[in-house]
Amino acid sequence: MIIWIRNIVVIFVLLSIVYVILSLRARFIQRAKLDAEYTAPDKSKDIAVSKQEYIAKGMQKYGKSYRPKLIFGVYLVPVAIMAGLIYLVQYT
């Protein structure tokens, strides 16, 4: 039983590291897109806010979107696969 607990802890730590890396990478990419959008020379509308305010508002919208929630699938997908495999091994 102790081995199972140790394995679960190790898997959780590895999944947490992957989650943090993916989350930070996605936020960095979104921030770069907002920066490029702000500095684009062919803007169709005049932006009367500063660059920091524009990026902050864009990141708030990003935080409410589905993409950060989908990254949480890093935890759900492997657990679902493992549960399915355990079920198949035990009951088939």
Image (cartoon, rainbow, N blue to C red):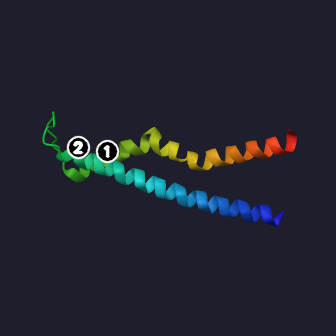
Q: Of the two numbered discs 1 and 2 on the same chain, state the one appearing first in sequence.
A: 2
Q: Residues within 10 Å of mark 1 (few under 14, many from 20)?
A: some
Residue 88, how many percent across, how many down? 80, 41
Residue 1, how many percent across, how many down? 84, 62
Report the front residue among 14 and 92.
92
Q: Quadrant of residue 80?
A: top right
> What amino acid does circle 1 point to?
Gly
| Image position of 30 (left or right of 84) | left
> What amino acid does circle 2 point to?
Glu
| Mark 1 → mark 2, Cα distance in angstroms | 10 Å
Q: Secondary structure at mark 1?
A: helix
| Image position of 4 (left or right of 47) | right
Give the number of the mark in front: 1 or 2. 2
Q: In the figure, 19 relative to 6: above or below?
A: above
Q: Quadrant of residue 67?
A: top left
Q: Give the residue number, with chain letter if any, for mark 2.
A: 37
Question: Residue shown at 66%/59% (left/top)?
Answer: 11
Q: Secondary structure at mark 2?
A: helix
Question: Residue shown at 23%/47% (left/top)?
Answer: 36
Residue 33, how many percent across, how many down? 29, 46
Q: Are the two marked residues, 1 and 2, in contact with CB atoms closer than 8 angstroms?
A: yes
Q: Give the residue number, with chain letter if any, for mark 1.
A: 58
Residue 46, how many percent across, how many down? 13, 38
Outermost top residue = 44
